[in-house]
Image: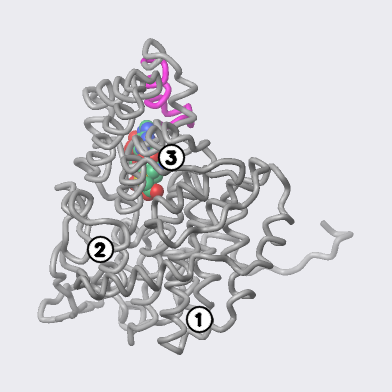
Amino acid sequence: MLDNQMKATLQIRDKTVELPMHSPTLGPDVIDIRKLYAEGDVFTYDPGFTSTASCESTITYIDGDEGVLLYRGFSIDELAEKSHFLEVCYLLLYGDLPTAEQLEDFETRVTRHTMLHEQMQNFFRGFRRDAHPMAIMVGIVGAMSAFYPDSTDIADPWQREVAAIRMIAKMPTIAAWAYKYSVGQPFVYPRNDLDYSSNFLRMCFAVPAEDYEVNPILSRAMDRIMTLHADHEQNASTSTVRLAGSSGANPFACISAGIACLWGPAHGGANQACLEMLREIGTVDRIPEYIKRAKDKDDPFRLMGFGHRVYKNFDPRAKVMAQSADEVLGLLGIENNETLQVAKELERIALEDEYFVSKKLYPNVDFYSGIILEAMGFPTSMFTPIFALSRTVGWISQWKEMIADPSQKIGRPRQLYVGPARRDYVEVENR
Ligand code: CMC
């Protein structure tokens, strides 16, 4: 909880303003500027929120200098190794690891909600055949508010809970069907005897004409991808979900807004963009040309899968993902895969290059995830939908936390207006 023993003093021209400060459990102290405008008659200016905490949260902690990521205090490396996605979902949603009984109950509840309302198929079929699966996901998840109106009352904790379970349960079905639709294959219904990631893989790759057996190593790799992406504190899409939710919008609308934000190439869309870049580079000998372009201020090209707003040492998720890529490609006997070779060499060169070292640009989670997903048989257009389905639990946990926070207000940033001052209207004939 916030304590405000410390104070920060701000001198604004001839006025001194004292601002309370708060100490978090981990991370830097925070200056509370809520009264700044009332007392100092000024706003703060922080485009991109590089120094601004937008909320109090107990869910996820990142130490960007040390490369640490904790979900509810547990490190991502340990969770990726010892836990599994649905247990991590429980942890994020309810704050602690479940007992065996709580876990079984949670898994049953999620498993029983995996089917979609049958009429939603009409919705899928309304999209153009070549629609990007992210476009379909934004639409379908938004449309859930119409199909499941009995869980849209945000003032009712039970309805919030049902909405959370519904979205976690149905998101793999939605992502898989968006894929099936794009390749012209029949939708495959979920199966309750399979675990979460196996069920998703089966819904993507099974066809009615023949049986499909999920490879347990691929299913474990998929589960790990989901775990690594499950939450990442106040990133752009999570902040979008919170901002949308701050107006009282229903949870399906808020998550749909989060999916839309995630789609951008600077955020979740980077996994698709990264693999496309690795393919475009094609061979190891062409890497220097791309490194040169990434460093050129006049060229908008950036090395996709490199850099992060918060991680300035390494992205702990990328470490686990690189290991997983080796395992999966080894299993499939494609460890000499050209894309992986290009990725490894690119990483090696970039990590030694003065430009990348001085700017602290390291491979992020998206750098290796695409290679694994491609090896599993996913087209690049499915990479971001898989990120979205994995992040759904994080968005919902953050949304639920926000709704329950008594200090919650509608999000409404200020601005530094630099447009014209007041001027008089000029009749069209006089312009
Ligand atoms: N390649 C080349 N130069 C880069 C890159 C890159 N990938 N990333 C940052 N820089 C440079 C940038 O030009 C700037 O240089 P200067 O100080 O000379 O102007 C400096 O590094 C700082 O960059 P920034 O854009 O101010 O940093 P940011 O914190 O606003 O952006 C980022 C972070 C992730 C958007 C950015 O690093 C980027 O565009 N990376 C590529 C896209 C990507 O991989 N995104 C996935 C992020 S992780 C998963 C997720 O969040 O979804």
Q: Amino acid at mark 1?
A: Gly
Front disc: 1 or 3? 3
Q: CA distance from mark 2 to mark 1?
A: 23 Å
Mark 3 or 2, nearer chain start: 2
292 falls in the magenta region = yes
Mark 1 closeness class: few <14, some 14–19, many ≥20 residues within 10 Å: some
Q: Is 400 positioned to the left or the right of 117 in the image?
A: left
- Assess mark 1: CB under 8 A from ligand 1? no
Relative height, residue 336 to residue 147 (above, below): above
Mark on residue 115? Answer: none
Disc 2 residue type (three-letter):
Thr
Q: Which of 197 and 413 lies nearest the eye of the viewer? A: 197
Give the residue at x 37% y 57%.
195
User: Counting other residues with Cα less than 10 Å from the Cα at mark 2, is it few (<14), some (14-19), or many (20 or more)?
Assistant: some
Amino acid type of the residue tagged 3 in the rendering: Asn
Compare marks 1 and 3 and give the one earlier in the sequence: 1
Q: Position of residue 239 (x, y in %)?
A: 41, 64
Q: Quadrant of residue 144?
A: bottom right
Secondary structure beneath dot 2 equals strand
* Element type where label 1 sits in the image: loop
Q: Nearer the viewer, residue 295 or 401?
A: 401
Q: What residue is at 24 percent from the left and 35 percent from the top? A: 323
Tags 3 and 2 touching, CB below 8 Å: no
Q: Which residue is mark 2?
A: 60
Q: Give the numbered dot on residue 248.
A: 1
